[in-house]
Amino acid sequence: MKEILKITPESFAPFGTVLTFGENPPDPRFEIKVTEPAQPWRIAVFCVSIKAAQRLECHPHSLESFTPLSGTGVLLCASPETPADVHAFLLDTSVCLGKGVWHEVITLSEKSFYQITENLEVTSEFYNFTAPITIGATEG
């Protein structure tokens, strides 16, 4: 069972960017946090109903953002080099995963919904666990 970590810019830095509004951005109306000029992006709504992770996924050539819409979920992440070293984050704020970061989202609610943004064309790779990863409070 994995401990759930709080997402902060520091704790999440090995995996990507926390999408928060800075204290003194150059333009007070918006702040660009991540750009990907090489490929167009797509936006989707992602429904999560699994409560245990059987595998992780990564996109070697694409960033991917997650913005919570409803429900309570946990984002499992691992660096590109060490997919077995999984970190669990309460997904209560918007984040953008770096290219090649292993990830999966599980829910603590009946279902959780997220807005995701990723490249229009996405290549996926998978890492299967020998046993499912669960989070303590999965009843519910």
Image (cartoon, rainbow, N blue to C red):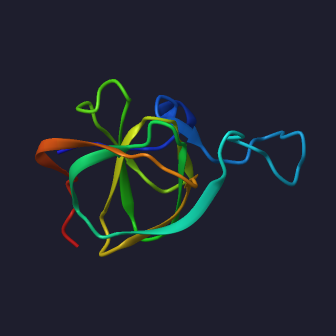
Q: Residue at x 58, y 43 (%)?
A: 18
Q: Residue at x 43, y 44 (%)?
A: 6
In the depicted structure, whether residue 135 falls above or below residue 32: below
The residue lying toward the viewer, choosing from 20 and 127, is 127
Residue 49 percent location from the top left of the image? 29, 70
Q: Using residue 50 as the reference point, say whether residue 22 is left or right of it.
A: right
The residue lying toward the viewer, choosing from 122 and 57, is 122
Residue 113 percent location from the top left of the image? 45, 70
**Image quarter of the C terminus:** bottom left
Q: Residue lying farthest right? A: 27
Q: Using residue 19 as the reference point, say whether residue 140 is left or right of it.
A: left
Residue 26 percent location from the top left of the image? 89, 39
Q: Using residue 95 as the reference point, say whether residue 101 is left or right of it.
A: left
**Image quarter of the N terminus:** top left
Residue 65 percent location from the top left of the image? 55, 51
In the depicted structure, whether residue 82 falls above or below residue 103: above
Q: What is the quadrant of residue 115 in the picture?
A: bottom right
Q: Residue at x 18, y 43 (%)?
A: 128
Number of dots carrying numbers: 0
Q: Residue lying farthest left? A: 130
Q: What is the quadrant of residue 36 in the picture?
A: top right
Q: Residue at x 47, y 33 (%)?
A: 11
The residue lying toward the viewer, choosing from 134 and 137, is 134
